[in-house]
Amino acid sequence: MKIPAELAITLAVVVREGSLEAAARALHVTQSAVSQRLATLERLTGQVLLVRARPVRATSAGDVVIRYARQVEQLDADAASALGLSDSDAARLPIAVNADSLATWLLAPLARVSRSRGFLLDLHREDESHTAALLADGTVVAAVTTRATPVPGCTVTTLGRMTYRAVASPAFAERWLSRDAGPAGLATALAHAPIVDFDARDTLQTRWLESRGVDPAAPPRHRVPSSAEFASAIALGLGWGMLPAAQRRGLDLVALGEPELAVTLHWQQWRLHSDHLDALASEVAAAASTALDQ
């Protein structure tokens, strides 16, 4: 049994759009046609592929079909480009990216390749330690990740390291982290000084506290889930946090001491011959070679 590409792509669009109605608009067909395609696909595979929730989501079997659909879409787009065929529906590349890379160095190379090759970007922002999961389940075709081991069916290229330092505004440091009492006094102060975390998955501040012998459960924590606003919150004295050099630049901040924490980033993409993907990987690697520590 072969999975009909049109049916697989319909499932992928339904999951991407979040509902059958939205998918019907995107595919320029009726909602009934979308429903019939899904029913046919589930009958052919003999498995439930879609959880009818709000928004809809794929089952584990559905993830397999969606991965296949996205591979077909990339191959179709590459073939059309090579043949010089015009297509009103530009190829779409779903990519998982971490917030700090997106805010500092990654958006420029993505934009350059998108403009030159005429495809659309569909960026999924996720913590760098979790982006590989989106690659594994077929949500994206490429990802910036901390995972060095290739996801099955993918290639991996090391990009470099983002190095973070613990920083705070001068006024915050003066109020909360006076060094008059020496290292022991600073450790006590850190147990009470507010922290700024990006979100619940952000462990950089926790790792730094642990390296200083401070219980990470002790301090109060703010959450600011936007990279630019995260840096601004620290500069405004909301709390202290870990920032890479590019985000510290131009802000009035003081360093809180060692250690620096380095996060090694990798580019993973499907092992699929695609001119779009290959061009994107090349541009990202070139940008990383100058923006990241090697």
Image (tube, rainbow, N blue to C red):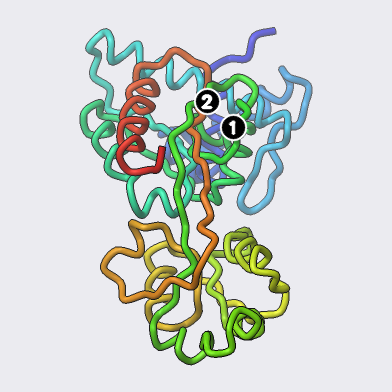
Q: How many marks?
A: 2
**Marks 2 and 1: CB-CB under 8 Å?**
yes
- The kind of residue on which mark 2 rests is Val
* Left or right for 154, reference 278: right
The disc label shown at residue 135, or none: none
- The kind of residue on which mark 1 rests is Ala
**Quadrant of the rendered image containing residue 212:** bottom right
**Quadrant of the rendered image containing residue 207:** bottom right
* Residue 46 drawn at (x, y percent): 78, 21
Q: Residues within 10 Å of mark 1 (few under 14, many from 20)?
A: some
The disc label shown at residue 148, or none: 1
Q: CA distance from mark 2 to mark 1?
A: 7 Å
x 63%, y 53%: residue: 54
The quadrant of the rendering that contains the C terminus is top left
* Residue 144 drawn at (x, y percent): 48, 39
Q: Earlier in the sequence, mark 2 or mark 1?
A: 1
Please say if 130 is above or below 261.
above
* Residue 137 drawn at (x, y percent): 64, 33
The disc label shown at residue 156, or none: 2
- Residue 97 in view: yes
x 65%, y 22%: residue: 152
* Left or right for 84, reference 168: left
- Residue 23 in view: no
Most foreground residue, 71 or 225: 225
Most foreground residue, 176 or 148: 176
Most foreground residue, 247 or 198: 247
